[in-house]
């Protein structure tokens, strides 16, 4: 099954693999706000960095519907207070690094004798490159999905290498990234992706919505004007090719760019990530995208 985006994401088949990030589970507390979670930086952190992360955590709480809770710096940590008990804080502690990157080729699972991926990665073999020539996308009003395309198998040479660790996922260089393990089927189990243009992709908004056209919860987002221009340049260069949605070193999806169209058209800074099985799962991803990445990594402390 092929995933694709059209201009302004007006029409799609299955759009993006499911991302089942844990949501915050709440229960009633006492009448007075109490400490419900302590977040500690991984390594040394300045007070300015902790303050920035406290703001990010607050945005995530709001996006998750936990506006009654608040986050503030207390000494060497961030303390979340409120009337709720946080049982699964993954949505607050994930790095939240989001980028859009060209797909160079697919890759199979790592073999039993695989080794760490070298830097730089070897080039995809010509037979397995997922460029527009190889994919041979042709818009067709009579085709079931509105287009036809060739199937390009994964490059078997990459079975010799393990995936790029999330901590080593430098968006300025090629990487070998796994598909989101909690999601549905994608084109490949792993993807060789190129550098992300200009690095960061700030959002002006991201929210969970119910998309009646696919009968599923989804995350609709809008990039800032500057990021929207970068997205237009990338999608134009990747017309009728795959672009990977990279969140914390995993490919949420790699939609095919505008296969039902004969010419590229602007996305106007918009996109949609779907489907999600629950509203809570969609909210968790929206919280990460809307808040942006953490300044310093956090983990739950005692």
Image (tube, helix red, strand yellow):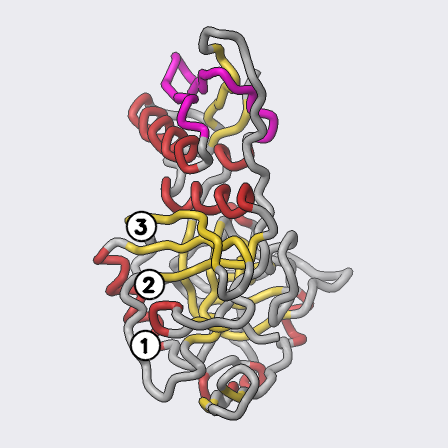
Give the Cα distance between marks 1 and 2.
13 Å
**Mark 1: secondary structure:** helix
Rounded to the nearest angstrom, the CA distance separating label 3 from label 2 is 13 Å
Name the residue beneath numbered marker 3. Answer: 202
Q: Are marks 1 and 2 in contact (CB under 8 Å)?
A: no
Instruction: Look at the picture and state if 212 lies above or below 23.
Output: below
Q: Residues within 10 Å of mark 2 (few under 14, many from 20)?
A: some
> How far across and down, in percent of the image, does residue 62 sit?
39, 32
Q: Earlier in the sequence, mark 3 or mark 2?
A: 2
The residue drawn where x is 43% and y is 41% is 287
Residue furthest out toward the left: 225
- Whether residue 37 sits left or right of residue 195 in the image: it is right
- Please state if 185 lies on the left or on the right of 6 as rendered: right
Tell me how far mark 1 sits from mark 3, CA to CA. Answer: 19 Å
Category of crowding for the residue at label 3, using alpha-carbon neighbours closer than 10 angstroms: few (below 14), some (14–19), many (at least 20): many
Which residue: 32% across, 48% down? 205
Q: Is residue 79 magenta?
A: yes
- The answer to which of 214 and 248 lies nearer the viewer is 214
Which mark is first along the chain, 3 or 1?
A: 3
Q: Residue at x 37, y 54 (%)?
A: 221
What residue is disc 1 on? 236
Indicate the position of residue 17 as horizontal and vertical percent values. 58, 60
Quadrant assignment for the N terminus: bottom right
Q: Residue 197 shows which numbered tag?
A: 2
Q: Earlier in the sequence, mark 1 or mark 2?
A: 2
Helix, strand or loop for disc 3: loop
Residues at circles 1 and 3 in contact by the CB criterion of under 8 Å: no
Q: Which residues are magenta?
A: 66-88
Is 43 left, or right, of 28 in this rendering?
left
Which is nearer the eye, 130 or 281?
281
In the rendered image, the vertical position of residue 3 relative to residue 133, given as above or below = above
């Amino acid at each position: 099954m092929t995933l694709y985006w059209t201009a302004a994401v007006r029409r799609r088949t299955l759009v993006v693999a499911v991302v089942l990030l844990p949501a915050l589970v709440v229960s009633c507390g006492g009448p007075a706000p109490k400490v419900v979670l302590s977040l500690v930086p991984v390594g040394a952190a300045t007070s300015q960095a902790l303050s920035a992360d406290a703001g990010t955590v607050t945005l995530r709480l709001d996006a998750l519907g936990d506006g009654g809770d608040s986050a503030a710096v207390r000494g060497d940590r961030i303390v979340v207070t409120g009337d709720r008990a946080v049982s699964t804080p993954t949505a607050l502690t994930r790095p939240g690094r989001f980028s859009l990157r060209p797909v160079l080729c697919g890759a199979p699972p790592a073999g039993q004798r695989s080794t760490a991926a070298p830097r730089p990665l070897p080039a995809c073999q010509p037979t397995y490159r997922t460029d527009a020539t190889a994919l041979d996308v042709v818009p067709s009003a009579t085709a079931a999905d509105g287009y036809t395309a060739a199937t390009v198998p994964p490059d078997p040479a990459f079975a010799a290498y393990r995936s790029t660790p999330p901590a080593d996922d430098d968006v300025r260089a090629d990487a070998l990234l796994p598909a989101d393990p909690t999601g549905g089927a994608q084109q490949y189990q792993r993807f060789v992706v190129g550098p992300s243009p200009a690095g960061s992709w700030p959002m002006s908004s991201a929210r969970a919505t119910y998309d009646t056209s696919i009968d599923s919860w989804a995350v609709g987002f809008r990039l800032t004007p500057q990021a929207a221009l970068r997205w237009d340049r990338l999608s134009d260069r990747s017309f009728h090719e795959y672009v990977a949605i990279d969140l914390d070193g995993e490919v949420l999806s790699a939609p095919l760019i505008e296969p039902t169209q004969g010419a590229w058209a602007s996305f106007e800074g918009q996109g949609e990530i779907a489907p999600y099985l629950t509203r809570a799962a969609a909210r968790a991803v929206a919280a990460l995208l809307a808040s942006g990445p953490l300044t310093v990594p956090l983990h739950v402390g005692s």
